[in-house]
Image (cartoon, rainbow, N blue to C red):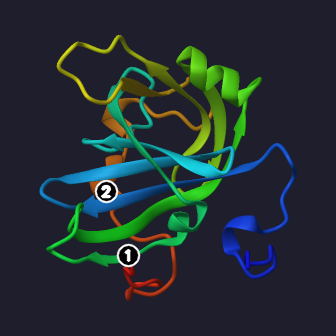
Amino acid sequence: MPQQADQDPTMQTRPFHERVFVVQKHWASRLHYDFRLELGDALKSWVVPKGPSMDPAVRRMAIETEDHALAYSRFEGTIPQDRYGAGRVIIWDEGVWIPEGDPLAGYRNGHLAFTLKGGKMRGRWALIRMQTRRHEKHPPWLLIKMRDSHAHDEAHDPGTGQRPGMVLSGHSPRIQYGG
């Protein structure tokens, strides 16, 4: 039986055009950030090796990965060593995203423009798909902060290292890995 909206934090009442986004800091074989956007009935996901930057001049590589279930937007915990993606995961940022135009068409066309309303990431952003090379399994994208009142140049960008903490309260995992 599906979980009811009032029981699932990812389905809290929000305006129709707003969708969930989450950035999970993931200490796997290498530290990286998982950037996830609710699109349709799943979380579209990208691995951002260096983490997001608030500097519009900095383009961050974002490698598209497999979709995740919406409930995964609330995951913090440790993935066991014998599982894919083994390591600790925290929610580094979360909030809602508002697409500019049709988000499905933007995704299909490789140019997704949107506004983020998160604790750390705010303002206008874009994901731009680059041309896939033969040896690449997953399409590379660029995650770009657009110029707006939330942008900072690199000299004044506190960056991911300066804002390392969890956005959820407490230091213990909210959900244990179960699958």
Q: CA distance from mark 1 to mark 2?
A: 32 Å
* Relative image position of residue 6 (x, y in whole percent): 81, 79
Q: Decide: is 71 above or below 31.
A: below
* Relative image position of residue 74 (x, y in whole percent): 53, 71
Classify mark 1: helix, strand or loop.
Answer: loop
Left or right of residue 130: residue 86: left
Q: Is residue 112 visible?
A: no
Mark linked to residue 162: 2
Left or right of residue 57: residue 41: right
Q: Quick one: quadrant of the C terminus?
A: bottom left
Q: Quick one: quadrant of the N terminus?
A: bottom right
* Relative image position of residue 105 (x, y in whole percent): 68, 21
Foreground disc of the pair 1, 2:
1
Q: Decide: is 174 above or below 117.
A: below
Left or right of residue 131: residue 121: right
State the residue at coordinates (85%, 65%): 13
Mark 1 or 2, nearer chain start: 2
Amino acid type for the residue under numbered disc 1: Gly
- How packed mark 1 is, by other alpha carbons closer than 10 Å (few <14, some 14-19, many 20 or more), is few
